[in-house]
Image (cartoon, rainbow, N blue to C red):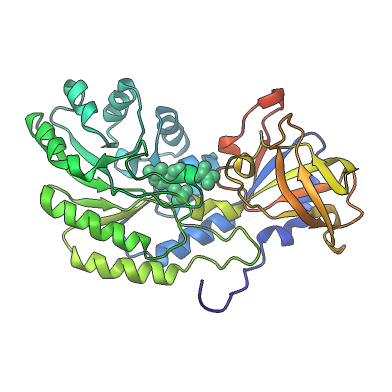
Amino acid sequence: IAGAVRPRETPWWRGERARLLALAAPDAPRYVYHLDTVRARARALAAIAPVDRRFYAIKANSHPAILRTLVEEGFGLECVSLAELHRVFETVEGLQAGQVLFTPSFAPRAEYEAALALGVTVTLDNVEALQRWPEVFRGRALWLRVDLGRGEGHHEKVRTGGLASKFGLPVSRIEEFLAAARTLEVTITGLHAHLGSGVETAQHWRSVCDELGGIAERIGSVETIDIGGGLPIPYQEDDEPFDLDAWSAGLAEVKAAYPAYRLAIEPGRYLVAEAGVLLMTATQVVEKGGIRRVGADAGMNALMRPALYEAYHGIHNLSRLEESADTPFDVVGPICESGDVFGKQRRLPGATAEGDVLLVADAGAYGFVMANRYNLRALPHEQVLA
Ligand code: LLP
């Protein structure tokens, strides 16, 4: 990326070390969320995004306090399962159906029926659903998710476009979809695309908006264009923060070309990733074949991202923050899989030892929500730092 590397702002957890150390407990890995950081990201986005509607993709982190905070900040909520729909209505008092999107993938018929009964905005992404369940959709106003023919994002597993991907109606089948919709008196009021997660190029959303705008002109009944989520955060220490100004300027330009439509976004990661840390306790330090490893009481069961995507998360020894982090360690979990590694050759204080509290940074998005009980390990706790 061209330009000078801007330093990252000091992460919130450095100022909360004492409170975090008091929260950590042996054998009880714990996610801690900082609501002020969630608010700060929400406000930064609200201040600059040239959009009419902002939805939070709750799959990134569905903790009740985070949902309430983001609704207070003016976000609607995007859900992908009936359980997520139930979560948002149970959690957020006074939430209106008009503030909620339902964008499932290969959901069973019963979930569409339940979502329509709740009155939320339902998005379809294939013709077959209309053909198989005409009585479910007859006479409805629906949104349509299209596949713009390519995927984007930080890893192959999070790219959600192109013919090989399961998401979205190919643009070549739009006429067929519209014909099926017409016979059922279904109106397409929204057009949606989400090409992937952790997209680094700020101009990506501009072209998505442009392409959807062109398709909306052909359809005629579209009111809202939803260009998805996918905004990245800087996971590596020397990553630049996402260029919100460039993102916004590009978007504003194309939006002006399509003044008839309301523009919507649905970020997840950007709002919550930096607000969360995973606290875990060192179990053993072992040297083998010249590699020093520190084990933690949480592994890929608690945070899957490194094992699944080789994702980078900063790792710090919270008990020894003032000591110099000069000794390379592999940081591993307790799970019986060789992929259970949080990071290789990470610099930690040489005295790192059993009982130290290790902090995994930027774990607020796709952390707890993807945790599981493999090896019958307990799920991590979750806690808010208000
Ligand atoms: N909208 C739709 C339709 C989505 O599928 C997603 C994410 C989002 C919005 C929000 O994307 P975000 O702004 O968070 O990038 N587990 C992976 C990420 C999977 C994202 C799935 N869909 C990870 O940990 O990187």
* Image point (31%, 54%), residue name: 264
- Classify residue 125 as left or right of residue 268: left
Q: Is residue 148 above or below residue 144?
A: below
Res. 57 in view: no
Does residue 135 appear in the picture of this structure? Answer: yes
Quarter occupied by residue 279:
top right
Q: Residue at x 35, y 60 (%)?
A: 205
The quadrant where residue 139 appears:
top left
The quadrant where ligand 1 appears is top left
Q: Position of residue 319 (x, y in %)?
A: 84, 53
Residue sticking out furthest to the left:
183
Q: Where is residue 50 drawn, in percent x and y?
A: 32, 65
> x, y (%) of residue 170?
25, 42
Image coords of residue 167 (percent x, y): 34, 38
Residue that protrudes farthest toward the right in the picture: 351
From this view, report whether residue 107 is shown above or below residue 293. Answer: above
Left or right of 306 on screen, residue 23: right
* Residue at point 36%, 34% (across, down): 104
